[in-house]
Amino acid sequence: MTYAEATEFLFGLRRFGWRPGLATIERLLALVGDPQVNLPCVHVAGTNGKGSTAAMLDAMCRAAGRRTGLYTSPHLLSFTERIRVDGTPIGETEIVALTERLKRISSVHFAPETTEPPDGCLPHPTFFELTTVMAFLHFRQQAVNAAVIEVGLGGRLDATNVIRPRVAAITNIALEHQEYLGRTPAEIAREKAGIIKPGVPVVTGARGEALEVIGETAARLGAPLTVVPDSYRWTVRASGFAGQTFDLRGPRREYEGLRITLAGRHQVENAVLAVAVAETLDEQGIPLDETAIRRGLTEAEWPGRLQVVREQPRMVLDVAHNPAGTEALADFLAERRAEIRRLILVFGVLQDKDWKAMLGRLAPLADEIILTRPPTARAADPAELLPVARRFARAAAVLDPAEALQVARTAARAEDTILVTGSHYTVAAVLRILRPAA
C-alpha cells in the first residue's frame, strides 16, 4: 500500500458520515490494546477556538520538556497534520503501516461496507473513528507523555470521548451542526459537556445558558469547574496582524506581557483559557511553570487563523466557517479598519452552513466581494450567494478559487487587504495555489 492508497482508503470511509456512539471505536481500541488508557491528556471541546487552544497547550507542554501528542481536525493541506508528535506531523510511512493494520482488523471484526450491520455485528469504523485510533496508536509508539486531543464533533458521542483526561476544556458554545447537536445553545452545550468525567477538572470559556448546562453537569459529576470569564481578568496592551501582548491576572498567578503570534481579540480569550488549563494541569501532575506557559504562548502557531501570507497587497486567510467565527473575524476587521484600507473579500462556503448570517456580518465591511466555490461536493453555489452579497457591495461569482484569487489581486492596490474566508476548504485551496511561490 502506498501513501496515496492509504489516504484514498481513509477518505473513502467518509461515505459512512458521522456516526454517534462509541461502541465501534471502543471495540477497535480493545483489539489494538487500548493505547488511550493511561495517556496523560487534555480533552478540548467547544464551538470555536478548539484548534488554537489545543495548539497553545501543546506548545506549553513541549516548552516544559514533555514529549507531546496533538490530535486535531480538520487538516488544511495534508492528512498528516492531524496527528503530531512534538510538533512534527506523522510521517507518510507511519500512515501507511497504521492504515494497513487497522484496515485488516476492521475487515475481520466489523461488518463490511455497511452502516446497517446484521445483528451481533458492529458497523465498520468511520473515517474519524479509524483516524482517532491511529492517533492513539502513534502516540503510544512514540512514547508520548502528554497529549492534547481535540473533539471532532460535539463531545458526548464523539469518537474521542473514550479517554479519561487530566483536564477537560470547553472553549465556548454557539449554534453549529444543529442537525446533530441540537437547536439551542443549551442543547448543544449538553452534548459538549458530555466530555466531562467524574472528578476530572473542567475549564470553560462558556457563558449564559450554555454555562448553566456545563455547571450543572460538572456539579452532578463532582468535577471541579473553572469559569474563565469569572476567574480571570486580562488587559490587551497591543494588538495587530503580527500578534498581541496582554496582561493576565488569575486565581493562581499574575502575568505581565504575555505574547501570542495569533491575531484577533478572540485569540486572547483562547490564550487565557489555555493558561487556565495549563495551571490546572500543573495541579494534576503535568508540571507547567510560568516559563513554559510564556514560551508556549509565544511559540504556538496555528495556520489559517488571520494568517497573513502576502504583503502589498496584504493577503489574509481565515477559516471562519460559522456565524460565531465570522463575528470574531468581523470584530477584528472593524478594529483594524484604517490599517486594512479597501477590503477585497474572497468568500467560499459550504451549503450546510448559515452563510446568510456569515455574509451578513462580513459583507458590510467589504469594498468588493468575490464569491467562489470551495473544492468539495458540499460547497454552496456562488450564484446563490450573489444576490445577498450585492446588497452590501459590488460582487461577482468566480467558481474557480484560483481565478477568484487572481480577480482579487487585480482589484487590490498595494495598500489594500484581500481576505480569504468562509471554509477550511477555501483557505486550503488558496494555500495550495500560493505554495509554489512561497
Image (tube, rainbow, N blue to C red):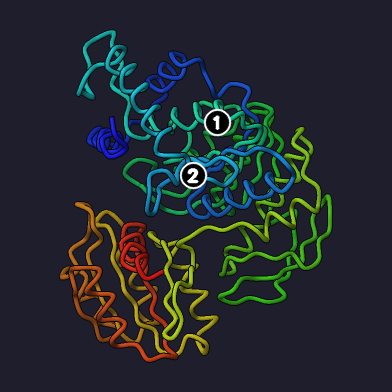
Closer-to-camera residue (366/60): 60
Residue 163 percent across, percent down from the top left: 55, 27
Residue 285's x, y, as percent?
77, 32
Tag 1: Cα neighbours inside 10 Å, few (<14), some, or many (≥20)? many
Is 62 placed left or right of 418 in the picture?
Answer: right
Residue that mark 1 sits on: 139
Tell me the SS state at disc 1: helix
Report which quarter residue 11 is drawn in. top left
Dot label at residue 13? none
Q: Which kind of residue does numbered mark 1 sit on?
A: Phe
Q: Is residue 24 left or right of residue 255?
A: left
Q: Which residue is mark 2?
A: 89
Q: Quadrant of residue 438?
A: bottom left
Residue at 80% across, 60% down: 249
Where residue 57 appears, as percent x and y from the top left, is: 64, 48
Dividing the image into 4 quarters, which one contains the N terminus? top left
Q: CA distance from mark 1 to mark 2?
A: 12 Å
Q: Residue furthest left?
A: 383
Residue at 23 percent across and 69 percent down: it is: 372
Helix, strand or loop at label 2? It is strand
- Label 2 is placed on what type of residue? Pro
Above or below: residue 414 compared with residue 199: below
Of residue 295 and residue 338, the one placed in the foreground of this image is: 295
For the residues bearing labels 1 and 2, Cβ distance under 8 angstroms = no
Q: Nearer the viewer, residue 176 or 39?
A: 39
Answer above or below: position of 63 versus 244: above
Q: Residues within 10 Å of mark 2 (few under 14, many from 20)?
A: some
Above/below status of 281 relative to 332: above
In the foreground, 393 or 96: 96
Upstream in sequence: badge 1 or badge 2: 2
Q: Is residue 304 above or below residue 94?
A: below
